[in-house]
Amino acid sequence: MSLLEVTNLKKIYTTRFGGNPVQALSSVSFHVEQGEYAAIMGESGSGKTTLLNILAALDQPTSGEVLLNGRNMADIRERDLAAFRRENLGFVFQEFNLLDTFSIEDNIFLPLVLAGETYPAMAGKLDKLSKRLGIADILKKYPYEVSGGQKQRAAVARALITEPQILLADEPTGALDSKATDSLLRLFEEVNAMGQTILMVTHSVKAASHAGRVLFIKDGEVFHQLYRGGASTEEFYGRITDTLTVLTTGGEDHA
Amino acid sequence: MRKHLYPHLAWLNLKHNYQFYIPYLLTIVGTAAGFYIMTALSYAGDLPQQIRYAYLTMFMTIGCFVVALFTVIFLFYTNSFLMKRRQKELGLYNVLGMGKGHIARVLAWETVYIGLAGIVGGILCGMLFQRLVTLIVYRVVRYSTGFTFYICWRGIAMTAILFGAVLLVNLIYNLIRMHMQNPAAMMREGSAGEKEPKSKWILAILGVLCLGGGYGIALRTQDALEALALYFVAVFLVIIGTYCLFTAGSIAILKLLRKNKKYYYKTNHFISVSGMLYRMKRNGVGLANICILCTMVLVMISGTVSLFLGTEDIVNKVAPADWTSILRYNPADEDTPDFAALEQRIAETARSQGLEVTKSRSFTNMERSFYLQDGQLKQFPVEHGGVLTWDVQVECLILPAADYTVLTGVSLSLSPGEVAVYDPDGVFPQQGALVFNEQGADGGSTWDYTVVQALTVFPGTGGWSPMIGAANVDENKGCCVVVDSLAALYELHGLSSNRYVQWSLLTELSGSEQEKLDAYCNTFDSFETSPDFSNTGSWEWFSTESRQMQLEEYYSMNGGFLFLGVFLGILFLAAAVLIIYYKQVSEGYEDRQRFQIMQKVGLERQQIRKSINGQILVVFFLPLLAAAVHVAFDFRLMVLLLQLFAMDSVKLTALCTLVTFGAFAALYILVYRITARAYYKIVT
């Protein structure tokens, strides 16, 4: 059994006043295995964000199902959803989404506080994590006092502190400079090496080339996928670029 | 199209920001209407012209000034609040290529729209409610003559000028502000939290000193005149203290809460404490604003309501009968007054106006103060080693037993030398002598007495009452001493060489209140028509007061106070509600994104509601609590101030304060619920 099983996912948006329905996802199916590091690539409007929102239980599919660890997400009651997200999913966003009202430390504690954990338990978890992520010395600072790279590390810490089944990253390098991007991607590799499953949505080839597998989405479908196999990051980068070229220019010929 | 671009843009802006501009517009309409009504009333041609209604014009003029002052301050406050919120929007216009001159034109058009709608709407509302308000004013001052509707052109002009000027100054302020900032700075979203004020210790100490000073004045003030002199000093100190302490205190408390990890790391505390700390200065000042406005509303309404409701009591004390006639005479004169003849003349006067005397009572009394020294009550204190000291000054009302019975219905039987005493403070020696003129050439004289009975009822004699007089000076105590006979009273009069003894005649009449009033006005009220009291013996002074006349006078004054108090109370209340609304709605928009992020991280909907309730509860009930404490301390001052108006029923004042507070709290809870819902809707 795979950790995440997505079958025939379909999402149609209809406007409130009965305008033309928009099909964001037509039929998406894929699996993510335990411990995998997968990236989803696609252009703007390809349905990436819709897919991620459905995986994050922030949105419901029109049809199809999502199983996490064999559990159908559609079966979770509305009022248990928040707790489900908290316990099983970790999020990293493009805009970091740290709260200015909290120090970095409190931002990382947020999901645990929401889950009702005690301070000593939280502090113990953060202690291990902060050293690994290299943010031990900025814990007392506020988000507006630290750099973008540091913010994203803090956001990763917030996502990982609940020890989620799967880490969902939405364009995590989108707001970072190249140095911070490299450092974050290295961090993701390290985290993945320790067994954390990661699913990342991106349109940065560089970010995708660090993943173990890349899924390409076009027109609401999984159009193609690439496995890294034994390839180096540079080689994989080249293959992704080639695929993208085919995707944007070639169109119909399935590889 | 281009010609209409700026007016059109201005209109769209207002529409887009309706959640902030509708309340702003309502504020202008409301204050303009209030101001117009006040000016119209103060220039009104049909206000009662009699001298006893002279206060009314004065009250309305005071009202005008207060409303105008309040308008200026409050419109500046709301304007600067609105512009701060719109910075980003205006910055965007600038970045998109509109010059500052163009933005200025848009802003000017916005002001024109708001100004026209607000001022015209305000004056129209004012005219609409002018009739109603006039009716209410006439009702509370008990003036029954009809009135007509009129348009007060002067009021319209003054309203238009005042509000036009305030809005113009606001616009100029906004333009200057805009010119001093660059677009990038305008667009930058303030993400940094407010820094802790460096001077917080000074703030805290200043706050404690000011508040302590204000409360100290309230606790130490001893009499009405002192209260009047120091009242506004105390108010000023308490206001400053409130601002300092709310700012410094709220920050200190919030930081303490954050330090307490067990408390802080609970979902609803976590979100609300961090949110309040994030805007700690704004939070503190906002809470202080609300607290002060609440206190003002409570004090004004409870004070004026209790004064108004106490009017009958006051008049009953001053004029216990329909007609209260007071005569002063010296019993040593050979030709003592012919009391029966005087009573007869009063009855004839009534009959000449078509009224009958239904009840007539009379009594004689004397007032004298004594000094308690060495356990004796003395007419004059005696020097000890060059210093004049005494323990207590006792104001005594002295009257014969029969007259005490007339006034209170309590019958007493006393023998010569025996007295009955009403002595609530327990200062009157039980047995001894009254000492007169101890240091005189003949060594003075004494009058021996024994207290045989303690009285529980103080006789209301009308006119001067030692209870009111004595309450004004703390060291002085009031007593009533009942002697066995008129002869004993005359004896004491002789010993104390008082100027006069007072004889009072309380006359009740048949007929309606209006008839009684007319009868009085036709006879006693003017010198020409005054009845003839010649050939009734020798007396120094004789005058008659009408209960109905006193009622009119007191109601015209106290009713005027009530109107002003309630009118301004409502105005301040509306301001407090608006401040709360703006605070919550603007914070709601700021917090919206935060709540969305937290929901992504796993915040449950129920938790949102809980944490919002926690935060809003503090915002609402901390000021209310502080206002209650302020009012509690102010209560003593208010009681003293009310004594200036002869209102001395502490019970009534306490009741009015409690009821006002209860009603206010109920209204406050309503506002709380509405605001909480608005906030919740915005953030989810």
Image (cartoon, grey):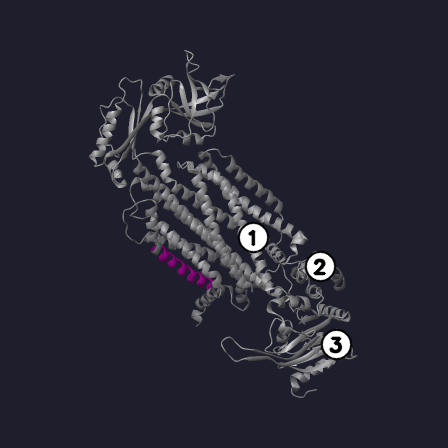
Pointer 2 residue: A122
**The residue tagged with tag 1: helix, strand or loop?**
helix
Residue A214 showing in the rendered view: yes
Q: Relative to B373, is A9 on the left or the right? A: right
Give the CA separation, mark 2 to mark 3. 32 Å
- Give the crowd class for mark 1: few <14, some 14-19, many >=20 residues within 10 Å: some
Observer-side mark, 2 or 3, equals: 2
Query: Which residue sits at x=70%, y=81%?
Result: A225
Q: Which residues are magenta?
A: B105-127
Give the CA separation, mark 1 to mark 2. 28 Å
Q: Given the image, what chain letter belongs to the residue carrying mark 2? A: A
The quarter of the picture where residue A69 lies is bottom right
Across and down, in percent, residue A102 comes to: 65, 58
Kindly identify the amino acid type of the residue bearing the numbered disc 3. Answer: Gly
Closer to us: A172 or B576: B576
Query: Which residue sits at x=62%, y=45%?
Result: B201
The quarter of the picture where residue A53 lies is bottom right
Are labels 1 and 3 on one chain?
A: no
Residue B528 showing in the rendered view: no
Pointer 1 residue: B618
